[in-house]
Every structure is written in structure tokens, then in C-alpha cells.
Amino acid sequence: MIIKKRRGQFEILAAFMVLVIMTSAAIAAINKLQDNPFKEPVTLATTIKSVDNSLHELLGFTAGYYGSIIKLTGNVTYAKEKTNSYFDGGLYTVAHSDINNGISLKLDQLSVKTTWFGVKGITQGSLSVEYSIPSVGLTGVKYLGSASLTATVLETTGDVCKVKVLGDNDEPNLSLTKDSFTFLKYDRTKTTWVYLTSKYDPMVSSLGIYSINIPSGINRDAYYLQVIDQRGIIVSCGYMRGVGNANKEHTYYTYTFHWNQTLYSGLNEPPMEIELLQDGTMRWLGQALPVNGTQVTIPPIPVKGIHLNETVDGVNKEVPFQIESWGSNYQLPFGIVSNSTIFNENCMIVFLIDHHVSQATLWWDGSDDAVQTSYATRNTKFTNDDPTHGKIDNGVLSLDVSNFRTGVISTTKTSPITSTCTFTRVNGTNPVYGSAPSYIIHHGVVRDIVQQEPEWSGGISSSPDFYGYIVLTIPAGANYYTYRVRLIYLPTTRSRILSDVSVIQLKEPTGTYNQKTEDGIQGGSPKWSSGSLFFQGGTAYQHQWTEYINSTNRGVGIITTSSANDLLYTFDDVIGANTGAISFDASNRRIEVNPVDMLRFPFQQGDDLTWVGGVVNFSSGNLPIYPNSGGTSGLWVLVESPPSVKVS
């Protein structure tokens, strides 16, 4: 088993050694032409053949070297520069070796290209060189040649896959061993790719079709394969049952969404913000959507080749998306990735869906000269962003994040309704925020991201050795924004008492509003209560939304998924008593999400906790979370009944 990074380094070192060997071979072959030990004269045809063979071998290495560099870096420009440099060095060495009467070599054209994890893997190089050997009367001889390797997974039956491998001029390559075929497996525990080989050498037909035993641990319905020949030329190809075959132009995954039609029929809901991770997890508000059947991984391909289509009300079309880079297990945002980045364990694809979307298709152009689609770069919704003044605008909702201390203010642009939220109160102390927020992504394609780090002036003496940060995401065209509040408690021997931990505090808008908090589901619709709600045995997921709503269904509120709501009670298990609550503070006119509410207890162990939710503004033209009239129509269905997804 070889870790990806180390294997890439090995391949480059091996390729460099091949360069040395092949250049030496070329020099030796040409030297023999000038110092022939045999009695018979060297014919011009023999001379040309020897030089051409040397150049062909050097071209084969070059194609292999290019593939090694580009598979590791994903940077085509860099890979071609390095490849051209090494090839020029090889020609220079040959031309200036100690050969009687010398040989002159002029490079006319060198071309190398490859593909990533397509239904057919191809790496090839072509070369045009003009050379002269005055000692044997050769001048202006043209070498035109190509070197290639092609691999296609034809079918998979049981534990055996059949792979067709062709070499130069599409001739079958019949001399590969089990070590020439490596299967990629994504290790979800280590969040990295590992390479596995079969235990047995494959059988091969005269057509170059190899029958290979698939190693244990590889999904027989969806996998990726790398093939390397004797020259070091590398190709990669993919297989997905019913999809990954030679009749398809591109490799793709289709995600079919299954919605509760009873709840969603006729609903005019805002888009759901979907995050697709490398391991195939598809998240909404921090919680994975349920998957029916196989969950497939996204291979290490350059992001510039990725595309996304959606089927909306029966019409299939390409749609906007963005590819982001995150750290700390997808908890710390870094920004939009470079288009030369290889998709990795820190990347996520972000796109929007609603119940009109029945399918999303992720596909990629595996060619190394693919051009990134404008759907991944063009900003059409965030044209009014103004980070200098702390303003974010998604076309439906404007967000003022200029002062986290006094509150994040969001306002609907039509029939305005405003919400104000503060964050991360600990033991009665509010953060002061020593610096301005970081605008990780602004003028985004499908969302913006703002990050802020809470600071408590002088620290909190009763709660030492912890820190936190806040991440807000603002989806395009939505009347909500999301929050991720992370608190990291370090193990400590000092006295640390928790008496109050409040993730978010939502102020009541100006006017007359009723406060409602979900208290479970009955008969397909939510029950609700007015007042503070703690965990009440039986079902942990009882308080997934809370709102302020007036008589005309205008208001503001908070929504969370079931896993985030469960985390609200994380300290209940620590102390063996109810302390996590949706708390209604009538005197200060605010709703609070409080993992620790009114109890005091020691907490010296370490823990890393992230609470995720959405803050919703609803006014004219927007559904409330739960309407005054009750029933099944409302935004509560987004968190109580998100769609399931099946991959094919």
C-alpha cells in the first residue's frame, strides 16, 4: 500500500532516472554508429533506424515524465515547462557528446498530453526532429514519431475487470504485469488515496485485453485504475457500472434527489446550500443527506475540468457552482481553489438545489487542456458586495457584518424585515472581537463566506484554555444565511467551570411578535411551544426551528438539522442532567441557542464542538418557518424532511 504523496514523489524520481538511462542509451547508440566494431559498412538505412529508435525511446520517456509531473501537481504549464526542459537537455547531451564528426539535432516540435480518470485513459507524445550526421553523409533527415498508452475498462464481472491496453500506433500491449495496474481506494479514516495491486498477474488476450483480479476493498461498482507501462507512461481511467464504459465521452455521476412530495408540493422555498465532499458526502447545514446505495468518491482531478448539470422541472442544463478549499476537516474556510488544483480532501463543490431539481450530474473533462467553465467563475448574484463597508448582498438578503459585537444584521430587500444576531457568549461574557471579519469569499458564484474570531477582553477566568471562531455563509438568492460556531476546549488542569454557553442570540424585531419553538412532530406537522425548551426524553431531535412571527406571517427565526440539534444537548451527557436548551429570554426579547443554560459544572476535558444553523428572514413573498395557520406549508420542511439522494 503506497500513500499518494509518496507514490507521486517516487514516480518523478523514477522518471528522472529513466531520463538518465534513455539519454545514455541514445548517446551509446549514436557512438556505435561512428565507431562500428564490425567489418561490414554501416548502411544509411541502419544509421537512420538507430537514430530514430533512440529518439523514439527518448519520446516515450518524455511522455511518461510529463504524466508523472502532471498527475502530482495538476499544473499543465509547469509540467510542460519541466518536460520541455528535460527533453531539451537530453537532445543537448546527445548533440554535444564525444562523437566523431558530431551529430546535429534540431527540435521542430514536441507535444505531450494526457487525460484524468476518464472512461478512456490516454497519454501520448508526438515529436518532430531534424538531424544530420556528416560522417555518414546524412543531412536534413526528419524524424516524425509518436509514443502513447491507452487504457479502457471494458467491463467488470464479479471480482474481475477487463481492461484493454494499447501502446504505440494503437497496437496491443501484451507485456504488462500485476504491478502495472494499481487501483485507487479512498481511505475515509485517513482522508487520502491509497494504491492497491492485485495478488495475481493478469491474463491477457492477443487484443491487449487484460483480465485482472480486483483487490479486496475496492468497490466493484465504481473504481479508478492507473496503468503504467515499461517506459513509465502513466494513464488513469474510471469505471462505474452502467456509466463508465467506452461509449461515454465523459465520466460522470448522477445524483437523484427524492423529495417528500406531500410536503414540498407547491412550496416556494429558498435554495438549499449543498456541499459535496471528496468522499462523496453531500451536506446540507452541516448534516449529510441520506444516501441510497453506493456513495462514490471524487477522484484527484484538476478542478478546471469539473462541470455540473441539474435537471430542473424536467429540463437538463448546466448550472453555477463553486469549488472551495477548507481545512481542519472542512471547518476552516480558505477560499476558492485555483483552477489548476487537484481535487483533494480539502475541496468541496458547492451548489444550490430546491425541490424542482430532480437530478444533479457531476461530470468532468479529463483532458489536460480543458478550460474551466464560466459556471464555476462568473458572479451574477453578488454584484453589490461591499466588503470595505462590511456589506454582503445576495440579491434577496443584505447582510451587515461590520460589527459582530453589536450584531450581524440581515434585511430582506423586498418588504424589508430585519434580524439581528450576536454570537458566542460564554459564562455571561460577550466577545469583543479585536479585529475586523475576514471576507474569505466575496463576489462569489453561489455563496459568500465571512469568518470572525471571538475574543474576550482579558479572557474568561472561570473558563480558561479554549478558543473559537465563527463562519457565516450566504447562499445566492436565499433569504437566510448560515452560521458555524466552533468552540475548541483544550484539556486543562486549571479550574474551568461552565455556567453559560450560548451559540447564537436572535433579537426580536421591532413590533409585536409571537415566539414559537418546535417541540416535536405529530401527525406529519410540527408541534410548537412558547418559552424555553430543554431536551425532553424520547426523541433527541425536537427543537429544529424557532421563530418570531407576527399576525401577517412576517418574522425571523433559526433552523437546524437533526444532527446540529442533537449537538445542542452535548453537555447533557457530560453532567447527566438537562442543560442544553432553546432559551426564550423575554426580558431581553431574544431567542438563544444555549448548549449550557443556567447550570454550573466543571469541564476540564478537551472537546471540539461546532454548532451549525441558519438564520431566516421571512416577509412578503417568503414562506415563514412555520405559519400562523399551521399545517405542512413552511420552511421547517427543509430541516425536518430534506431529500435523500441516490448515485448512479
Image (cartoon, rainbow, N blue to C red):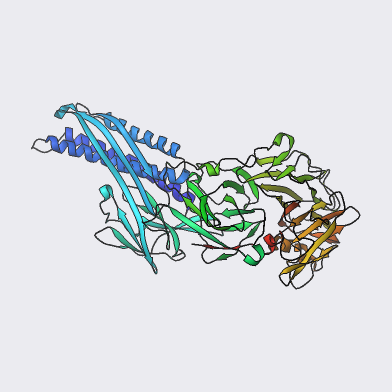
Residue at screen point 41% across, 45% down? 367
* One can see residue 222 in this view: yes
Dividing the picture into quarters, in which one does residue 591 lie? Answer: bottom right
Q: Residue at x 19, y 26 (%)?
A: 101
Quadrant housing residue 558:
bottom right
Q: Where, quadrant-wise, is the N terminus in this rendering?
A: bottom left
Q: Position of residue 240 (x, y in %)?
A: 44, 60
Query: Can you tell which quarter of the image residue 566 is in?
Result: bottom right
Q: Is residue 526 above or below residue 176?
A: below
Residue 228: % across, % down: 35, 52
Task: Describe residue 83's horizontal placement relative to residue 507 as left or right.
Answer: left
Task: Residue lying at the far left in this picture: please name it.
Answer: 40
User: Residue farthest to the right?
Assistant: 587
Across and down, in percent, residue 234 comes to: 37, 49
Name the residue nearer the viewer: 435 or 199.
Answer: 435
Judging depth in this view, the residue of 272 and 60 nearest the camera is: 272
- Front residue of 161 and 480: 480
